[in-house]
Image: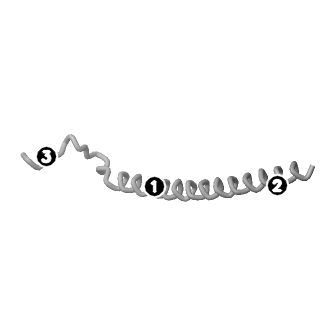
């Protein structure tokens, strides 16, 4: 009986370590997702601000080499 309890304690300790490591990974991934979402918002803002005004089209503009 004593050896069974010891074995269970070892398994619980191992599981706790695994859970802690997984929590760290999830935290890092969440931070990365938040940074990527912020970068995506910035890129969308840049694209929206770079769009030509209404009535103008990029096809109407002459390329610089002409």
Q: Secondary structure at mark 1?
A: helix
Query: Where does label 1 land, which residue?
Result: 41
Residue 63's tag is 3
At horizontal 21% and vertical 40% (from top left) the residue drawn is 59
Q: Is 56 in front, or is 14? A: 14
Q: Which residue is mark 2?
A: 9
- Residue at (61, 54) in percent of width and height: 26
Q: Is residue 56 left or right of residue 11?
A: left
Say which label, 2 or 1, has the lower sequence index: 2
> In terms of sequence position, does the residue under pointer 3 or pointer 2 come before the other?
2
| Left or right: 64, with 46 as reference point | left
Residue 55: image tag: none
Sort mark 2 into few (<14), some (14-19) or many (20+) by Cα contacts within 10 Å. Answer: few
Determine whether the residue tagged by mark 2 lies in a helix, strand or loop.
Answer: helix
Which marked residue is nearer to the observer: mark 3 or mark 1? 1
Residue 43 x, y percent position in the rendering = 39, 54
Mark 3 and mark 2: Cα distance apart in space: 73 Å
Residue 58 vs residue 24: left or right? left
Q: Residue furthest top?
A: 59
Cα–Cα gap, marks 3 and 1: 29 Å
Instruction: Indicate the position of residue 8 as horizontal and vertical percent values.
Output: 83, 50
Along the viewing direction, whichever of 11 and 44 lies nearer the viewer:
11
Q: Residue 1: x, y in percent?
A: 93, 49
Residue 65: image location, x then y, percent? 8, 47
Q: Contact (CB < 8 A) between labels 3 and 1?
A: no
Closer to the eye: label 3 or 2:
2
Mark 3 or mark 1, earlier in chain: 1
Mark 3: few/some/many CA within 10 Å (<14, 14-19, 20+):
few
Q: Is residue 52 left or right of residue 3?
A: left
């Amino acid at each position: 009986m004593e050896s069974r309890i010891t074995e269970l304690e070892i398994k619980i300790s191992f599981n706790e370590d695994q859970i802690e490591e997984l929590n760290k990974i999830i935290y890092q991934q969440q931070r990365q997702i938040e940074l990527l979402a912020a970068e995506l918002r910035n890129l969308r803002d840049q694209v929206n601000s770079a769009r030509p005004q209404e009535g103008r089209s990029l096809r109407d503009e002459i390329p610089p080499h002409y």
